[in-house]
C-alpha cells in the first residue's frame, strides 16, 4: 500500500536495478513514473525513443513493483512550443507564458489537444497491456501554477462557443449578465471578450461564466485523455493527482472520467504558505513542522468523496520541500504519521514524492526518501517502518474492506469558491478559510466526516454542515429537503441565482421554503471590527461577515446580535447561522448540532485527531508531548499505547 514517485529518465540506467530492488526491499509496492518525460520519449517530432522506458518499466516490474504511468502532457517539449507557439497559455494581461518550467499549455488550444491525443495514444498503445502496468495518471496536477484560466485567443474562441451553447442568443446572455448596466450589451457572441484588462471591476456574471468555462475545459481535456487510455489499456485504472487547497476547477466534474481521485499531500507547505486557508501566524509557527492537524484529513475526506469512497495519496511529503515560503523539516515521526493518517481515512496507496533528492534543476532543494548521495533519509526510514507495520494481521484483516459512509457530511462546492473569489465583498472573506473553520470544529469533536458536493443524496447523514452555498441548484435543494438529519446553513447560502444575480425573494433564495428567513442586509467587517453574538448564555465576538435576517414567526430565534437582530435561527432541524463563526462559536454550534442529531461526540485536545476504520480507532498526536488516548479503559492497542507518544499515533480496537 506504499509507493514512490520515480524519474528513471533523470538518472543513469546503471542505478535503475539497484533502485528497484531497494524500493521493493523497503516494502514499497507501487511506483509512479513518466509524467514529465515527453522530451525523453519523443526527442524530436515523430521520433519516439521507447527503449529506455521499455527497460525502465521492465526493470521495475521484475523487482515486483506495480507501475503507474503518467501521461507526459504537463511538459510539452521545446520543439513543440517552437513549432506551435499558439499552444502557450496567456496570462490575465494577455501575455503568453513561456517555455522554461512546466504546464505551459492552454487547455483550449485545438493544436495542443491534437498533440495530446497523439502522445497519449502513442504511450497508451505501447504500454497499455504491459504486465507491470496497473494504472494511469492523466497529466500532472491540473491547474498548478495558476494554469486553469488562460486568456489566449484560443480560449476566447472556445469561450464564445461555450456561451452560445449556454445562452442560445445574445439577448439571453445580456439578460443573464445584466448587461444593460454600464452599456455592456453585446449584439453577437463574437462581441464577447475574455474578462480581462478592463478599466475597473468586471461584471461578476461574466467572470463567473469564464471560470465555469475554464473548469469545463479541464474536464473535457481530461475526458479526452481518459477515453484514449481506456481504448488501449483495458483493465487498468485511471486517476489524476489533484492538489491541496485548490478550487480553480470543479474536481467533481473532472473526476467523472477517472476511476478514483488521488492527491498530493504537502502538509508543511500548505500550512506555511496557503493564505486562503486563513491560518494565523501563531498557528503557522505552532504547526510549522507537523502541518495543521486538519490539513491532510480535510483533503482525504474531500478526495474520497470524488468517486465511490476510493482515493490514493499520489505524492506524500518526505522531508522539507522547496516551494513554500519557508521550508522547515518535518518532525521525526511525521512522515509515518501522515502515511497512517491517510490509510486511516481510506487511502488505498500512499506514494512518497520522490525516491531520491535530485541534485540538479528546479527541485534540487526538495527532499526524497533518499538523499542525493543515495543514502536512505529520515523519510525513507519512516516509510520502511510503516511498511513493516502494514504487515500486521489486524491491518491485513481490514485493509481491503470498502470505506463506510460517515454520519456527518460537509458540503463543499467549487462554484461557491468562485463566487467568493470574484466578489469577496470584504478583503478577509475566503471560502476555504470558512469551510476549514467548520471542518476543524467537527474534527475537534472526534467525528468522521464525508465531504460531498451539493446535490448528493444526504439521506444517510445525521448531520450536514453547509458553510456557504452561493447558488442553490434544484438538485441541491432537493437533497436538503429530503434529508431528515440536522442541517446547518452558513452565511451567503442561496445568495445568488445561477447567473450571479441576487434572487428575487432575496437570500437564501429557494431555501426559504425549508427555512423561513430572509437576508435583508450583509456587512463585511475589517479586522478588529466586531459584532457581539449571544447564544445559549455565551457571547461571541464575530468579525469578517454578518447578516441581518428577517425571520418568519414559525421559526425559532436562538441567538441574537447585540443590535437585537436574529443571528441563529432554527426550524425543524434546519439552522441558519448569520455570522462568520469564531472558532468557539463553530465548536459550540457543532456540539449542539451533534447532540441534537444523536451522534456521540467529545471535545478533543487541540492537537489530537481521531479517525475510525472498520472497528479500529486511530488517534494522531500532532504535539511534542505525550497525550492520553481518548480510548475506553481496557482497549486493545494494535499500534502505540494509552499514552500517545509525541508526533505519533495509537490505534485500538473499538
Ligand atoms: C507537486 C508536483 C511534483 C513536485 C512536487 C514538489 O506539486 O506534482 O511534480 O513538483 O509538487 O513538492
Image (cartoon, rainbow, N blue to C red):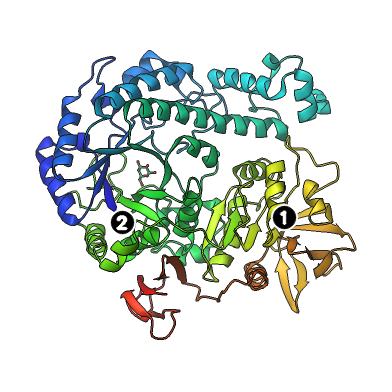
- The correct choice, above or below, for 588 with respect to 156 in the image is below
Question: In percent of the image, x 18 and y 56: which residue is there?
Answer: 26
Q: CA distance from mark 1 to mark 2?
A: 39 Å
Asked whether residue 185 appears in the rendered view, the answer is no
Asked whether residue 35 appears in the rendered view, the answer is yes
Residue that badge 1 annotates:
491
Q: Position of residue 587 (x, y in %)?
A: 62, 70
Q: Secondary structure at mark 2?
A: loop
Q: Position of residue 503 (x, y in %)?
A: 81, 42
Question: In percent of the image, x 59 and y 47: which residue is there?
Answer: 453
Of labels 1 and 2, earlier in sequence is 2
- Of the pair 309 and 42, the residue shown nearer to us: 309
Q: Position of residue 418 (x, y in %)?
A: 63, 41
Which quarter holds ligand 1?
A: top left
Q: Is residue 98 left or right of residue 235?
A: right
Mark 1 Cα within 10 Å, few/some/many (few <14, many 20+)? Answer: many
Question: In percent of the image, x 18 and y 50: which residue is there?
Answer: 23
**Which disc, if any, is residue 319?**
2
- The correct choice, above or below, for 195 with respect to 492 in the image is above
Q: Secondary structure at mark 1?
A: loop
- The correct choice, above or below, for 320 with respect to 109 in the image is below
In the rendered view of the protein, which quadrant contains the N terminus? bottom left
Amino acid at each position: 500500500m506504499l509507493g514512490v514517485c520515480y524519474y528513471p529518465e533523470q538518472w543513469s540506467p546503471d542505478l535503475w536495478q539497484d533502485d528497484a530492488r531497494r524500493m521493493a526491499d523497503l516494502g514499497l509496492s507501487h511506483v509512479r513514473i513518466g509524467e514529465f518525460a515527453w522530451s525523453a520519449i519523443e526527442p524530436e517530432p515523430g521520433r519516439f525513443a521507447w527503449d529506455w522506458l521499455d527497460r525502465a518499466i521492465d526493470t521495475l516490474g521484475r523487482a515486483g513493483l506495480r507501475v503507474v504511468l503518467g501521461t507526459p502532457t504537463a511538459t510539452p517539449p521545446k520543439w513543440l512550443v517552437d513549432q506551435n507557439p499558439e499552444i502557450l497559455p496567456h496570462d490575465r494581461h494577455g501575455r503568453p507564458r513561456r517555455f522554461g518550467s512546466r504546464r505551459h499549455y492552454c487547455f483550449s488550444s485545438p493544436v495542443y489537444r491534437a498533440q495530446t491525443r497523439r502522445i497519449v495514444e502513442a504511450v497508451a498503445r505501447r504500454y497499455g497491456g504491459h504486465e507491470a502496468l496497473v494504472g494511469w495518471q492523466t497529466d500532472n496536477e491540473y491547474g498548478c501554477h495558476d494554469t486553469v484560466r488562460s486568456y489566449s485567443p484560443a480560449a476566447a474562441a472556445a469561450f464564445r462557443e461555450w456561451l452560445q451553447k449556454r445562452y442560445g442568443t445574445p439577448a439571453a446572455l445580456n439578460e443573464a449578465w445584466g448587461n444593460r448596466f454600464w452599456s455592456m450589451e453585446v449584439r453577437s457572441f463574437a462581441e464577447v471578450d475574455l474578462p480581462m484588462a478592463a478599466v475597473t471591476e468586471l461584471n461578476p456574471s461574466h467572470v463567473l461564466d469564464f471560470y465555469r468555462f475554464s473548469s469545463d475545459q479541464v474536464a473535457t481535456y481530461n475526458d479526452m485523455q481518459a477515453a484514449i487510455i481506456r481504448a488501449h489499456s483495458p483493465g487498468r485504472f485511471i486517476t489524476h493527482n489533484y492538489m491541496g487547497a485548490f478550487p480553480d476547477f470543479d474536481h467533481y466534474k473532472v473526476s467523472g472520467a477517472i476511476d478514483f481521485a488521488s492527491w498530493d499531500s504537502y502538509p508543511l507547505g500548505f500550512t506555511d504558505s496557503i493564505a486562503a486557508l486563513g491560518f494565523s501566524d501563531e498557528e503557522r509557527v505552532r504547526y510549522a513542522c507537523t502541518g495543521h492537524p486538519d490539513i491532510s484529513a480535510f483533503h482525504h475526506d474531500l478526495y474520497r468523496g470524488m468517486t465511490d469512497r476510493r482515493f490514493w495519496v499520489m505524492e506524500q511529503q518526505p522531508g522539507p520541500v522547496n516551494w513554500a515560503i519557508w521550508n522547515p523539516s518535518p518532525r521525526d515521526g511525521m512522515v509515518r504519521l501522515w502515511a497512517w493518517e491517510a490509510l486511516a481515512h481510506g487511502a488505498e496507496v500512499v506514494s512518497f514524492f520522490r525516491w531520491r533528492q535530485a541534485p540538479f534543476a528546479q527541485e534540487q532543494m526538495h527532499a526524497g526518501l533518499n538523499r542525493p548521495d543515495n543514502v536512505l533519509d529520515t523519510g525513507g526510514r519512516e516509510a520502511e517502518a510503516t511498511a513493516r507495520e502494514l504487515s500486521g494481521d489486524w491491518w491485513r484483516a481490514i485493509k481491503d474492506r470498502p470505506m463506510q459512509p460517515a454520519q456527518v457530511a460537509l458540503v463543499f462546492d467549487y462554484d461557491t469558491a468562485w463566487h467568493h473569489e470574484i466578489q469577496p465583498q470584504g478583503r478577509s472573506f475566503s471560502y476555504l478559510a470558512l469551510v476549514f473553520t467548520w471542518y476543524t470544529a467537527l474534527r475537534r469533536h472526534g467525528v468522521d466526516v464525508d465531504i460531498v458536493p451539493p446535490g448528493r443524496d444526504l439521506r444517510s447523514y445525521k448531520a450536514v454542515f453547509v458553510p456557504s452555498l452561493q447558488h442553490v441548484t434544484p438538485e441541491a435543494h432537493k437533497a436538503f429537503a429530503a434529508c431528515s438529519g440536522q442541517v446547518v446553513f452558513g452565511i451567503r447560502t442561496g445568495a445568488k441565482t445561477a447567473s450571479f444575480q441576487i434572487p428575487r425573494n432575496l437570500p437564501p433564495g429557494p431555501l426559504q421554503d425549508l427555512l423561513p428567513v430572509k437576508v435583508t442586509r450583509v456587512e463585511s467587517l475589517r479586522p478588529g471590527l466586531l459584532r457581539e453574538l449571544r447564544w445559549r448564555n455565551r457571547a461571541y465576538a464575530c468579525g469578517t461577515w454578518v447578516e441581518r435576517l428577517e425571520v418568519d414567526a414559525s421559526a425559532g430565534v436562538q441567538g441574537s446580535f447585540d443590535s437585537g437582530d436574529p443571528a441563529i435561527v432554527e426550524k425543524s432541524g434546519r439552522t441558519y447561522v448569520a455570522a462568520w463563526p469564531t472558532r468557539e462559536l463553530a465548536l459550540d454550534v457543532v456540539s449542539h448540532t451533534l447532540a441534537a442529531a444523536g451522534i456521540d461526540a467529545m471535545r478533543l485536545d487541540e492537537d489530537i485527531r481521531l479517525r475510525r476504520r472498520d472497528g479500529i480507532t486511530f488517534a494522531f498526536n500532532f504535539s511534542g508531548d505525550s497525550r492520553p488516548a481518548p480510548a475506553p479503559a481496557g482497549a486493545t492497542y494494535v499500534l502505540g499505547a494509552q499514552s500517545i507518544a509525541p508526533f505519533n499515533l495509537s490505534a485500538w480496537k473499538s
